[in-house]
Amino acid sequence: MGDTDAIKKGLEAYQAGVDKSLAKFPERKKEFTTVSKAPVARLYTPLDNAKQDYLRDISFPGEFPYTRGVQNTMYRGRFWTMRQYAGFSTAEESNKRYKFLLEQGTTGLSVAFDLPTQIGYDSDHALSQEIGRAHV
């Protein structure tokens, strides 16, 4: 029996177990989706990828299209970035805070800007009447 046949046989057994579970515990929602509303199946197997070109669509970790992460060894050699979202009072106070966070082991900073800056206006521009609404 080839891999495809073994997977199909395993799927039949799996589905029987699912049917028993659903009889006792129905799923919480009719459909599960991603944040962009794409449907998410209960299970994916290699059979679902039969039409994919591995090198073009999935590839290796650390290589385009980065579906398996940006590090080729993932987190075995380098920890994930521990990020702090930080914006604090004045530029001087923010600088002190960033230095403090980095001294404490943070490996990346996400800087919070005022709303006008986030949307591309100078914060003192006449159209920038939302200053302080982004809490910075």
Image (cartoon, grey):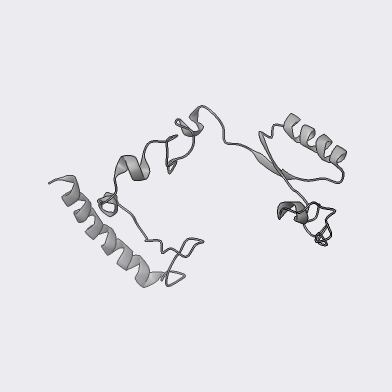
The residue drawn where x is 16% and y is 51% is: 5
Identity of the residue furthest to the top in this view: 77
Q: Quadrant of residue 128?
A: bottom right
**Residue 18 or 83: which is nearer the viewer?**
83
The residue drawn where x is 86% and y is 46% is: 89
**Residue 51 or 104: which is nearer the viewer?**
51
**Residue 71 or 46: which is nearer the viewer?**
71
Q: Is residue 119 left or right of residue 62?
A: right
Please count the marks in the image.
0
- Residue 17 coordinates in the image, percent (x, y): 30, 62
Vertical comparison of 109 with 26: above or below:
above
- Residue 108 coordinates in the image, percent (x, y): 66, 36
Vertical comparison of 15 with 124: above or below:
below
Vertical comparison of 99 with 88: above or below:
above
Identity of the residue furthest to the front in this view: 126
Q: Is residue 83 left or right of residue 40?
A: right
Q: Is residue 72 left or right of residue 53?
A: right
**Residue 55 or 69: which is nearer the viewer?**
55
- Residue 124 coordinates in the image, percent (x, y): 85, 53
- Residue 42 coordinates in the image, percent (x, y): 37, 60
Q: Is residue 98 left or right of residue 70?
A: right
